């Protein structure tokens, strides 16, 4: 996250101890690389004076860090980039410092399954900030279950003062492209409470598993046959198939329009699924996966995952 501390924080002649501690904690997050410091060249003298007085031991480090941050900030241009900066005002510096120092939270329906999924996606799409945050334990996953996810997200959001760094990630559970599913309204209610929420475009996380993952799940010959049959599906058909259990012999009304016309051999061959191990297998193969694997499966699904990663990146 790109963070700018108000200039008057550094020009306050007699800051309170609580404010000094809050600034020290913010500077620590910049030094660790947890967040990026946004500083103007015009502010460096004030920063240098402040840290020399209040953090003399680390002052040389912080001054050099400010100078480097100013150079990097000067390279960022455009209103979109400017809008991605979190501004920390002096009256609330302690609250923002606590929020930015606290671990960010990704609330999901299932841990470890959805954690496996997001870690694998972060590797495949080279989402460096998320990968670093997970590896250095600057972000934590919370298990919400299907119906309990909103409550878990709200509880975690209550630990933040000014800047809520919680995102809830839902499966869509939609049975067809025109079936909204039960989770979009839940996500909307969270967003109304200033809690970030994302609903996957496809039915479940398993619907994003590339072919090279699926062919390794369970009995290899049967998996290969299923993957070959899935190659005969259109992207929207694959996107709403129950990957774990397969296509039911009796279609529910919401799915008749997209599956009823399938050839019988496809329906029979996909009547059983890949089981519960798909996301774990994605995680095991995370170093082997790339964006191209997801693009080859479904370009819209790959774009959906990029959008999700951008949202998570904006909060961690």
Image: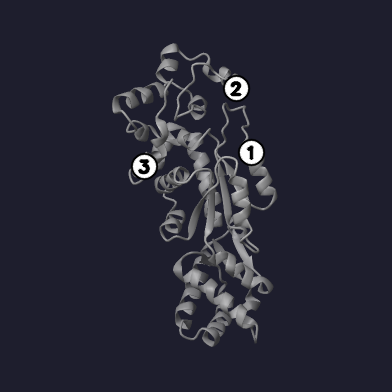
Marks 1/3: CA–CA distance: 29 Å
Contact flag, marks 3 and 2 (Cβ < 8 Å): no
The numbered mark, 1 or 2, whose residue comes first in the sequence reads 1
Q: Look at the image and tell me whether residue 5 can be seen.
A: yes
Residue 204 position, x and y percent, is 51, 35
Residue placed most toward the observer, 290 or 282: 282
Residue at label 3? 289
Local packing at callout 1 (Cα closer than 10 Å; few below 14, some 14-19, many 20+) is some
Image point (52%, 61%), residue name: 103
Residue placed most toward the observer, 67 or 186: 186
Residue at label 2? 254
The numbered mark, 3 or 2, whose residue comes first in the sequence reads 2
Contact flag, marks 1 and 3 (Cβ < 8 Å): no
Residue at label 1? 184
Q: Classify mark 1: helix, strand or loop.
A: helix
Image point (61%, 61%), residue name: 159
Quarter of the image holding residue 76?
bottom right
Q: Classify mark 3: helix, strand or loop.
A: loop
Residue placed most toward the observer, 13 or 197: 197
Quarter of the image holding residue 266?
top left
Image quadrant holding the N terminus, namely bottom right
């Amino acid at each position: 996250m790109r963070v700018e501390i108000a200039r008057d924080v550094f020009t306050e002649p007699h800051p309170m101890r609580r404010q000094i501690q809050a600034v020290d904690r913010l500077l620590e997050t910049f030094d660790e690389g947890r967040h990026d410091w946004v500083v103007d060249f015009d502010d460096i003298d004030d920063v240098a004076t402040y840290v020399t007085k209040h953090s003399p031991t680390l002052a040389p480090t912080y001054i050099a860090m400010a100078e480097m941050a100013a150079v990097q900030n000067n390279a960022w241009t455009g209103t979109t980039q400017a809008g991605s900066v979190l501004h920390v005002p002096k009256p609330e510096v302690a609250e923002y410092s606590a929020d930015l120092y606290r671990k960010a939270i990704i609330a999901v329906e299932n841990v470890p399954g959805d954690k496996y999924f997001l870690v694998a996606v972060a590797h495949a799409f080279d989402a460096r900030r998320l990968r670093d945050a997970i590896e250095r334990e600057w972000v934590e996953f919370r298990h919400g279950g299907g119906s309990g996810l909103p409550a878990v997200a709200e509880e975690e959001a209550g630990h933040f003062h000014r800047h809520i760094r919680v995102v809830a990630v839902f499966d869509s559970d939609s049975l067809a492209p025109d079936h909204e599913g039960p989770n979009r309204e839940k996500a909307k209610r969270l967003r109304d409470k200033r809690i970030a929420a994302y609903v996957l475009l496809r039915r479940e996380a398993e619907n994003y598993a590339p072919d090279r993952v699926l062919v390794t799940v369970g009995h290899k010959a049967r998996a290969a046959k299923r993957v070959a049959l899935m190659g005969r599906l259109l992207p929207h058909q694959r996107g709403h198939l129950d990957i774990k259990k397969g296509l039911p012999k009796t279609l529910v009304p919401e799915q008749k329009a997209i599956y009823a016309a399938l050839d019988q051999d496809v329906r029979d061959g996909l009547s059983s699924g890949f089981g519960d191990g798909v996301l774990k297998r994605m995680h095991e193969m995370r170093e082997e996966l790339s964006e191209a694997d997801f693009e080859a499966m479904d370009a819209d699904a790959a774009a959906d995952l990029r959008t999700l990663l951008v949202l998570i990146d904006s909060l961690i």
